[in-house]
Amino acid sequence: MPHALITGITGQDGLYLGELLIDKGYEVFGLVRGQSNPKVAMVEKTLPGVRLLEGDLTDLPSLIGAVEIAQPDEVYNLGAISFVGLSWRQAELTGETTGIGVLRMLEAIRIVTSDEMGRIRFYQASSSEMFGKVRETPQRETTAFHPRSPYGVAKTFGHYITVNYRESYGAHAVSGILFNHESPRRGVEFVTRKISRGVARIALGAQEKIALGNLEARRDWGFAGDYVDAMWRMLQRDTADDYVVATGETHSVRELLDTAFSHVGIDDWSPYVVQDPRFLRPAEVDVLVGDASKARDLLGWRPAVGFRTLVEMMVNADLAAVRSELDREDATLRGDAAQRA
Ligand code: NAP
Ligand code: GDD
């Protein structure tokens, strides 16, 4: 049975990847940080059989310990401060976790394998945010980087240190340059989930407006379930390389609003959306769109879920979740009223 160690197991991609690897017969180990991480119960419920190990990307000894216990054939480094907006406010922590954290994970593998790094295959979760102020469109593996946020700068370090360990120590280290990917498991701080949840709450009468920043930004949005399959495929090749993973389509935040609101029967969303300067960024990435032909040709990877299906899947999941929340609130209110009566 192959062993896999996943950092970032509590995140969106960690959960989808854990499910994929368990289905393929892997023993899955997940790194969990903090002394009482509130997401542990959710991970254990979603991934029965997963073995959780304590560790933090800012703490090398804990990473060495995790690699020693897991004895992994494959390490997927998904852990990061991943919210671009936060990275300006906590730039040093972002650098330590999202950037230097990659170096620490590679060092842990180098130390545990006594310099025979090729024994453990390594996946680094790189990002289209590295392209930033884009130099060409669509972006591909050879496009120059111009990151626009502390997060993008940290990811660019993580990408290059992965390539460097491949070239310096023969590490089987792969960098997946993934464009935005979303799902009902997406954190509520990201724009797709903020909109799907906001639209569901508005449709059910629980919220009046959604406050947003730049509506003109364009992203290449795919489905996270498709993208974790690309990660696994990258590590199955005998040659370590870098791959862009994207749908090849770009849509604006405005189009995202059109699609999400029309799904609940609202054609004119202007009364429900306000622009709030708090959500504007000091430097913006205006347009991203990826060319994933290398992943298609060498990995046989193609996205299965398109933009409209993705948005509708997210709005449907939030409608169901908000309905249950409202039912629970009603039941509590009825209980309180009965006690007072
Ligand atoms: P996510 O949902 O934000 O998950 C981030 C994970 O990192 C969480 O499990 C978090 O743990 C963990 N983490 C944070 N700080 C850590 C630390 N100091 N030590 C160990 N773990 C730590 O992100 P995601 O969307 O699944 O993305 C997975 C990876 O792909 C990230 O590296 C992200 O930057 C990258 N990426 C994502 C996209 C995308 O569109 N989703 C695109 C390109 C690249 P807690 O739960 O304890 O906070
Ligand atoms: N989060 C957020 N909230 N974004 C907003 C809002 C808002 O209220 N209003 C407009 N936007 C715009 C942002 O300015 C950005 O241009 C776009 O919506 C997408 O923002 P996010 O969903 O936060 O994602 P991101 O593109 O910055 O970063 C995500 O994708 C990267 C890959 O390109 C994250 O998942 C990163 O971790 C990932 O690397």
Image (cartoon, helix red, strand yellow):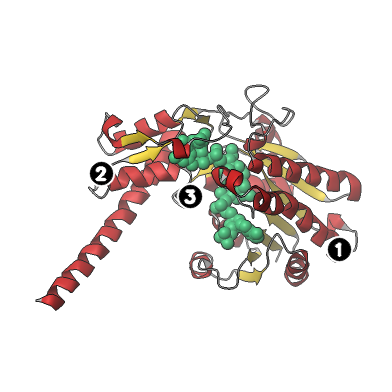
Quarter location, residue 149: top right
Secondary structure of the residue carrying numbered label 3: loop
Q: Position of residue 215 (x, y in %)?
A: 44, 30
Disc number at residue 176? Answer: none
Disc number at residue 111? Answer: 1
Residue name at image x 16 percent, y 69 percent: 334
Query: Of the residues under marks 1 and 2, which one precedes in the sequence?
Result: 1
User: Is 323 on the left-hand or right-hand side of 71?
Assistant: left
Q: Which residue is under mark 3? A: 186
Q: Position of residue 29 (x, y in %)?
A: 65, 66
Type of residue at label 1? Ile
Q: Give the residue furthest to the left.
A: 341
Residue name at image x 56 percent, y 47 percent: 86
Instruction: Using the rendered image of the protein, determine whether residue 136 is visible from the camera's viewpoint.
Output: yes
Q: Residues within 10 Å of mark 2 (few under 14, many from 20)?
A: some
User: Is 94 on the left-hand or right-hand side of 180?
Assistant: right
The answer to whether residue 74 is above or below residue 211 is: below
Type of residue at label 3? Arg
Secondary structure of the residue carrying numbered label 1: helix
Do the numbered discs 3 and 1 sit on residues whose CB atoms are within 8 Å?
no
Type of residue at label 2? Ala
Query: Of the residues under marks 3 and 1, which one precedes in the sequence?
Result: 1
Quarter location, residue 198: top left
User: Looking at mark 2, is its residue's CB closer than 8 Å to ligand 2?
Assistant: no
Residue name at image x 71 percent, y 53 percent: 96
Query: Of the residues under marks 3 and 2, which one precedes in the sequence?
Result: 3
Quadrant placement of the N terminus: bottom right
Q: Which residue is under mark 2? A: 203
